Image (cartoon, grey):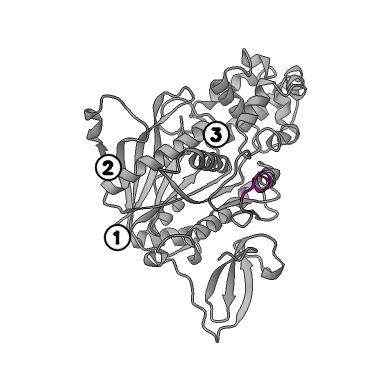
């Protein structure tokens, strides 16, 4: 039976403050045997890490500011290791684009949330924010708005520390951030804000932004004029930035071609991105005889509006995009920027621009690395990117031996059969450019996980 707990501390406070969990609910628990079944059902490779603990999954409500700096409730999922017996690191996962309130972590605290459960079973305190305005949170979601993305993550990290201790879970100093797609943008936003303003509260150990639109004003806008698999992303950005900045248009008709201005009502949390895409394609075909196979996001925009945007660097839409670029700082903690070069949703140029900008601004080239995941599209790149990021984090955990992360000791008589990357391709580690996690397979069936670092820092 589910039980809901409300923290009594709020009856003692005269005013609310940031970083507070105000209610929480234990949704589900898993023992070690049940987690092993999750490994099997999801074909999780053994090298992803050893199962050491049972796990409890919680839905939490916490406080974070909206675009008007007013405190509102946001929701999240937290997965805690049971009886961990040591100081657990925090792993904060930032999810990809979600429009439906049923597509966020707090609505998926079940055995399908393999990342949350498995990471916690390895010893991590695993945090998964829904972000502002999604799930059962208050207000609307500000899609790809870096300020409220960052605050939603930081406030959850700060709030989780007291929460974990209240549940009998030891908590350490280390914090790891990882996210894919929009989650890559969120991760980068959180890294920037933590390193600039929260170094006394959060010790950022490492981060892995993956396939994120870090260059909203340049790299990502190239997708406006191409056939795009998710045209619903564009109105999501427009409606969000209009809510935040208030000056992109006077009425939606100023920007959108007739028919498309009605899309606003589909972003109320009750529709999936697939349903929104279908609506856009239907409007295009019925109103303008443009087939889905030919439709570009640009086909939604009035020509005069688009020309004004192209010809004026002070245009409100351009300024909003620039305000949410995330390549204008110098990361300090180790960072792996992961991206596949055939990404059809988020151009690979986002990753190269970010990495080049960071190195040019003085970042440590041995610590801030770019990993090209290969010739894969946005969806196919996701799974192995996440596994790779998690394994990289494992190598940095303080006292990782005590949580059983298994690094095989290779006996002298073993012979190397081949080396492969995390997507199963046979590779030659001596010819690989950049930093990459590789699997060394030996003739006795054992596998050794190594990080092939050009810097040799491991």
Q: In the displayed structure, would residue 420 be above or below residue 230?
A: below
Residue at 51 percent across and 39 percent down: it is 196
Q: In the displayed structure, would residue 179 be above or below residue 145?
A: below
Residue denoted by label 2: 2
The quadrant holding residue 402 is bottom left
Residue extending furthest bottom? Answer: 413
Closer to the camera: disc 3 or disc 2?
Answer: 3
Residue denoted by label 1: 85
The magenta region covers: 357-363
Q: In the displayed structure, would residue 353 be above or below residue 234?
A: below
Number of on-image labels: 3
Crowdedness near tag 2: few (<14), some (14–19) or many (≥20) residues, C-alpha within 10 Å: few
Gap in angstroms between the C-alphas marked 3 and 2: 35 Å
Residue at 62 percent across and 13 percent down: it is 251
On the image, the x and y values in percent for residue 285 come to: 71, 26
Asked which secondary structure carries label 2, the reply is loop
For this rendering, which residue is in front, 42 or 67?
Answer: 67
Is residue 278 visible in this depiction of the protein? no
Asked which secondary structure carries label 3, the reply is helix
Quarter the C terminus occupies: bottom right
**Tag shown at residue 130:** none
Mark 3 and mark 2 lie on one chain; the one further toward the N terminus is 2
Residue 148 among magenta residues: no
For this rendering, which residue is in front, 356 or 140?
Answer: 356
The quadrant holding residue 243 is top right
Residue denoted by label 3: 146
Mark 1 and mark 3 lie on one chain; the one further toward the N terminus is 1
On the image, the x and y values in percent for residue 124 come to: 40, 54
For this rendering, which residue is in front, 346 or 272?
Answer: 346
Residue at 64 percent across and 36 percent down: it is 230
């Amino acid at each position: 039976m589910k039980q809901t707990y409300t923290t009594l501390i709020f009856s003692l406070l005269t005013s609310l403050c940031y970083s507070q969990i105000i209610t929480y609910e234990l949704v589900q628990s898993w023992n070690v045997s049940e987690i092993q079944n999750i490994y099997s059902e999801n074909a999780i490779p053994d090298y992803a890490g050893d199962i050491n603990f049972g796990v409890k999954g919680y839905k939490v409500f916490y406080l974070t500011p909206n675009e008007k700096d007013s405190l509102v409730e946001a929701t999240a999922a937290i997965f805690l290791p049971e009886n961990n017996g040591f100081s657990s690191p925090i792993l904060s996962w930032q999810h990809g684009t979600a429009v439906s309130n049923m597509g966020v972590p707090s609505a998926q605290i079940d055995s399908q949330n393999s990342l949350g459960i498995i990471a916690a079973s390895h010893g991590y305190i695993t945090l998964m924010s829904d972000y502002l305005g999604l799930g059962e949170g208050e207000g609307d979601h500000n899609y790809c708005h870096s300020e409220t993305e960052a605050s939603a993550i930081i406030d959850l990290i700060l709030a989780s520390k007291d929460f974990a201790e209240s549940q009998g879970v030891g908590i350490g100093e280390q914090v790891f951030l990882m996210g894919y797609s929009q989650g890559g943008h969120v991760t980068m936003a959180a890294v920037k804000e933590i390193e600039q303003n929260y170094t006394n509260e959060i010790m950022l150990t490492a981060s892995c932004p993956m396939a994120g639109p870090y260059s909203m004003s340049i790299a990502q806008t190239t997708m406006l004029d191409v056939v795009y698999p998710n045209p619903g992303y564009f109105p999501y950005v427009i409606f969000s930035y209009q809510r935040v900045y208030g000056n992109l248009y006077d009425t939606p008709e100023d920007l959108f071609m007739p028919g498309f201005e009605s899309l606003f009502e589909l972003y109320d949390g009750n529709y999936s991105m697939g349903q929104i895409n279908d609506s856009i394609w239907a409007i295009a075909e019925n109103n303008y005889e443009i087939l889905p196979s030919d439709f570009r996001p640009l086909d939604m925009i009035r020509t005069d509006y688009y020309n004004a945007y192209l010809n004026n660097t002070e245009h409100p839409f351009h300024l909003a995009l620039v305000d949410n670029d995330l390549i204008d700082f110098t990361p300090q903690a180790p960072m792996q920027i992961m991206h596949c070069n055939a990404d059809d949703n988020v151009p690979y140029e986002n990753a190269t621009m970010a990495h080049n900008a960071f190195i040019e601004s003085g970042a440590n080239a041995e610590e801030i690395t770019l990993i090209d995941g290969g010739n894969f599209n946005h969806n196919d790149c996701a799974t192995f990117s996440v596994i790779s990021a998690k394994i990289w984090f494992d190598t940095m955990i303080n006292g990782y031996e005590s949580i059983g992360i298994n690094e095989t000791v290779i006996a002298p008589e073993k012979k190397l059969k081949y080396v492969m990357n995390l997507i199963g391709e046979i590779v030659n580690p001596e010819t690989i450019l950049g930093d990459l996690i590789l699997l060394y397979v030996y003739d006795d069936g054992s596998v050794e996980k190594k990080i092939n670092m050009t810097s040799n820092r491991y």
